[in-house]
Image (cartoon, coloured by chain):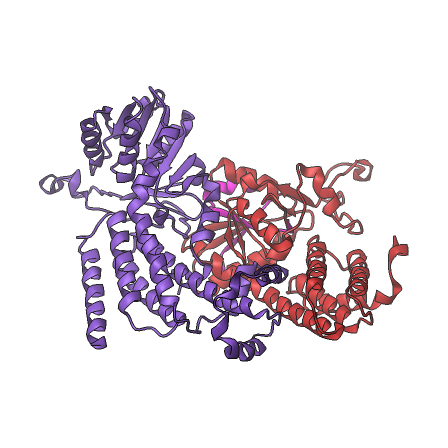
């Protein structure tokens, strides 16, 4: 029976990887949802004795998924979030146990021999005064090293707790709920950012931005200028969708961005990923838009879910980029006459953090310089997964 | 000044001198921490306050000794003493266990510090891509270690080093890089903007990292950072976290009090360089350090991670509170 479940999990993983490779599951949101579901299944049905083996398993799966589609950063982000959840839940159990004991000893070996005896009766009395003392202890450890990491380096995640799995499952469910509700949560803030009779410029096709604008349109009247975003022409889709929601919409070509910018009050865009320094990896054309906005001192607001927060650094325009087929703007038949002409169709632009004014995430608005803080809150430094 | 020094700790200076001369390649944090551990070990005092007093006396000796060439020495000492005072809230059955505990933690700290350069090299590794040209200013062991580490992995990159007057430490950097077969070019300090278009990014070390994420470093760093910003080149800093200093300079003159009084200014008018008849009669001002504000710094590579300047204050709070 167990074997069967395991086989089924393997099969699920393989088929998801195929979907990723064939790009039948596309778009950050869909991919994230599917990855989170898959990892939840794995935690639920997989065979793991303690947190450490689970972490190792998830890391292996995570790497497979990331390799299947290396530029879908959100896969890695979801994997890191899940790993972080596992570590957090484990630590909660671990600390509770420690607190219940009032043990001030720092020597781990000593500690373990004494704890194993009193293992059972202290799960509940964790909210007593000793938790305060322990907090102080925790901070007194601080010296030249950042404490949480320092603290955790000694913890090997190998102890077993009967209720750990349920707690992890709960948290992963919360993560999935967060994903489901994020468009709503971002859109709810629209009223604070879009005012009456403003002119907004946007580009590309982002569900987050679309819902954001539509939500604002329920209360305010404003104009939207949509950049068509060649060569994918996704902007045209956005324009149609917005005009159907009876928003005053104007469609312009990419080359008209600078000319139109002087009459724009705000640029609101989506992004493919937010990098560790607050920079963006976004549809190509975004950099032009951002520079034009900067020139005219128009604020650039980026609407994004937290799952697009990526703990990697983009070093330059080429580090994380993809070259698409030039077929979208250069027909194959025409190309025949252009033997000596090179053609590149980069998918992404890297936009430096100083070009971005504000991020609107599902937990509120943030400055680009605050992104590193969010990273520390949602990911563990050991789960970068890149260089291992 | 010497009136405030406790003669019992003269051995500290002697040992410090010996350690620094023996191991020229290690950062100042390691000998300092080791000496302070020794102070705890040898201490006869029976209270934490007494121990703290002894440490403070030893630190005073260290700070004023002529071998103290680094402004980060005081931040290393401060954090070590802090670490001792913080432990006082803990209950130990007797003072000896407390002491041995402190020594043990100190040893861990010293190990950690000695690992920090390797860690920085690993973190910064991805920033050195094949084919890049890096501008380096002054002589920094962290930067040197980082570049040698990358070269050792077979990465091909070239380095441009400034002469870094007045002590011309750039020659030392250039020679060391050349010995490792890294293509190096030495330029004048005044030639930075002339060659900046060939540079992919600037990489410097730091004497100290201050609270707002700015750095205090060898004179000329600030200039280079301004040029880099004007040309939109990234400006990276590599430094260990013990260089985090609790000071908040608002302008260049604010860093004067970070400096050690006893380090003499090495710059003198050079007869061969000037055609002036009596250069001695000219008033020469030659500061050795300058302060680079955080807005000119792209990222800092520390063993705590790759940090944006705004993340520095957070890390400082973690270290000191």
Pinpoint residue A320: horizontal percent, then vertical percent: 34, 50
- Between A184 and A369, the residue placed more toward the observer is A184
Q: Quadrant of residue A158?
A: bottom left
Q: Can residue B190 be found in the magenta stretch?
A: yes
Q: Colour of chain A?
A: purple
Pinpoint residue A223: horizontal percent, then vertical percent: 28, 22
Q: Decide: is B209 above or below B274.
A: below
Pinpoint residue A23: horizontal percent, then vertical percent: 19, 53
Horizontal arrangement in the rendering, residue A13 relative to residue B235 (left or right): left
Horizontal arrangement in the rendering, residue B166 relative to residue B43 (left or right): left
Q: Colour of chain B?
A: red
Pinpoint residue A269: horizontal percent, then vertical percent: 32, 35
How many marks the image carries: the answer is 0
Residue reaching furthest to the right: B3
Q: Which residues are magenta?
A: B180-208
Horizontal arrangement in the rendering, residue B252 relative to residue B63 (left or right): left
Q: Can residue B227 be found in the magenta stretch?
A: no
Q: Decide: is A148 above or below B207.
A: below
- Between A265 and A142, the residue placed more toward the observer is A142
- Between A341 and B71, the residue placed more toward the observer is B71
């Amino acid at each position: 029976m167990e074997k069967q479940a395991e086989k089924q999990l393997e099969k699920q993983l393989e088929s998801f990887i195929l979907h990723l490779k064939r790009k039948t599951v596309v778009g950050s949101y869909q991919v994230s949802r599917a990855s989170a579901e898959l990892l939840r299944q794995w935690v639920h049905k997989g065979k793991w004795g303690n947190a450490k083996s689970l972490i190792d398993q998830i890391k292996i799966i995570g790497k497979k998924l990331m390799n299947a589609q290396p530029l879908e950063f959100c896969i890695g982000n979801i994997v890191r979030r899940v790993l972080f959840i596992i570590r957090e839940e484990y630590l909660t159990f671990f600390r509770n146990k420690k607190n219940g004991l009032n043990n001030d000893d720092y020597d781990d070996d000593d500690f373990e021999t004494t704890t194993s005896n009193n293992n059972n009766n202290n799960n509940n009395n964790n909210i007593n005064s000793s938790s305060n003392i322990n907090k102080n202890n925790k901070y007194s450890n601080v010296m030249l090293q950042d404490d949480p990491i320092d603290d955790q380096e000694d913890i090997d995640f190998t102890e077993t707790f009967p209720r750990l799995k349920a707690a992890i499952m709960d948290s992963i469910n919360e993560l999935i709920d967060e994903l489901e509700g994020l468009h709503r949560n971002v859109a709810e803030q629209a009223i604070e950012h879009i005012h009456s009779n403003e002119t907004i410029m946007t580009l590309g096709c982002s569900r987050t931005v679309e819902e954001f604008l539509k939500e604002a349109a329920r209360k305010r009247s404003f104009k939207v200028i949509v950049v068509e975003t060649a060569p994918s022409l996704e902007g045209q889709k956005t324009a149609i969708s917005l005009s159907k929601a009876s928003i005053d919409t104007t469609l312009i070509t990419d080359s008209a961005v600078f000319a139109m910018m002087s009459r724009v009050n705000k640029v609101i865009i989506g992004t493919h990923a937010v990098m560790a320094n607050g920079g963006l990896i976004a549809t190509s054309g975004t950099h032009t838009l951002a520079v034009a906005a900067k020139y005219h001192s128009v604020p650039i607001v980026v609407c994004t879910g937290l799952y697009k927060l990526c703990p990697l650094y983009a070093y330059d325009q080429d580090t994380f980029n993809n070259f698409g087929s030039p077929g979208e703007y250069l027909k194959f038949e025409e190309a025949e006459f252009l033997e000596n002409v090179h053609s590149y169709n980069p998918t992404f632009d890297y936009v430096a953090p100083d070009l971005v004014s504000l991020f609107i995430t599902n937990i509120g608005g943030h400055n680009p310089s605050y992104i590193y803080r969010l990273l520390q809150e949602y990911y563990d430094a050991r789960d970068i997964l890149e260089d291992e | 000044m010497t009136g405030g020094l406790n003669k019992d700790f003269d051995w500290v200076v002697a040992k410090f001198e010996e350690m620094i001369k023996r191991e020229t390649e290690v950062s100042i944090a390691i000998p300092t921490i080791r000496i302070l551990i020794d102070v705890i070990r040898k201490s006869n005092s029976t209270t934490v306050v007494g121990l703290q007093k002894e440490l403070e006396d030893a630190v005073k000796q260290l700070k004023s000794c002529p071998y103290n060439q680094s402004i980060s020495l005081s931040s290393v000492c401060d954090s070590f003493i802090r670490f001792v005072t913080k432990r006082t809230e803990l209950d130990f059955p007797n003072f000896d266990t407390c002491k041995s505990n402190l020594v043990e933690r100190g040893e861990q700290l010293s190990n950690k510090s000695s690992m920090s350069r390797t860690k920085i090299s690993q973190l910064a590794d991805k920033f050195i891509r094949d084919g890049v040209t890096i501008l380096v200013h002054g002589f920094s062991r962290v930067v040197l270690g980082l570049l040698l580490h990358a070269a050792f992995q077979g990465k091909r990159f070239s380095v441009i080093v400034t002469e870094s007057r007045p002590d011309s430490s750039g020659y030392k950097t250039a020679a060391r890089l050349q010995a490792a077969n890294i293509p190096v070019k030495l330029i004048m300090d005044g030639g930075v903007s002339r060659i900046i278009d060939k540079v992919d990014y600037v990489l410097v070390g730091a004497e100290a990292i201050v609270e707002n994420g700015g750095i205090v470093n060898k004179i000329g760093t600030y200039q280079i950072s301004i040029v880099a910003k004007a040309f939109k080149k990234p400006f990276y800093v590599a430094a260990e976290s013990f260089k985090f200093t609790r000071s908040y300079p608002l302008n260049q003159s604010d860093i004067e009090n970070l400096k050690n009084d006893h380090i003499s200014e090495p710059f003198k008018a050079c007869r061969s360089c000037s055609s002036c008849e009596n250069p001695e009669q000219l008033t020469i001002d030659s500061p050795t350090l300058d302060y680079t504000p955080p807005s000119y710094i792209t990222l800092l590579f520390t063993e705590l991670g790759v940090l944006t300047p705004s993340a520095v204050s957070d890390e400082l709070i973690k270290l000191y509170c």
